[in-house]
Amino acid sequence: MKPDIHPDYHPVVFQDATTGEAFLTRSTVTSERTIDWPTAAGTDSYPLVTVEISSASHPFWTGTSRIVDSAGQVEKFRRRYGQV
């Protein structure tokens, strides 16, 4: 790799805002917030990035589904475009 052209690739903790579940991975994203994460050598401090949805809260991965009000959407469409 050429020096000085690649972004810094470092360990980062991502935390799901809905469930609070966190996981440590590597990324180029930066954050001013930090979190203490237990490691084999003790506890280290890593940047913390909060995400709105992850595999811990996504309906596809959790097996839950949201109730979609399709009848209400159809009525809204008909009112908007003049069909009764």
Image (spheres, rainbow, N blue to C red):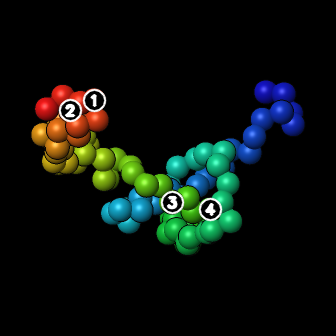
Q: Which of 8 and 65 is in front in this view?
A: 65
Q: Which of marks 2 and 3 is in front?
A: 2
Where does label 4 land, which residue? 47
Q: Which of 35 and 62 is in front in this view?
A: 62
Disc 4 or 2, which lies upstream in sequence? 4
Q: Which of marks 1 and 4 is in front?
A: 1
Where does label 3 land, which residue? 50
| Position in image of residue 39 (x %, y %) | 51, 65
Q: What element carries label 4?
A: strand
Which residue is rendered at x = 19% and y = 48% of the image? 66
Q: Residue 78 carries which label?
A: 2
Q: Is mark 1 on a helix, strand or loop?
A: loop
**Callout 1–callout 2 Cβ contact below 8 Å:** yes
- Mark 3 to mark 4 CA distance (whole Å): 10 Å
| Position in image of residue 6 (x %, y %) | 78, 35
Disc 3 or 1, which lies upstream in sequence? 3
Where does label 1 land, which residue? 81
- In this rendering, the answer to whether 15 lies above or below 6 is below
- Mark 1 to mark 2 CA distance (whole Å): 5 Å
Q: Which residue lies furthest to the right in this view?
A: 4
Q: Few, some or many C-alpha atoms within 10 Å of disc 1 (few <14, some 14-19, many ≥20)?
A: few
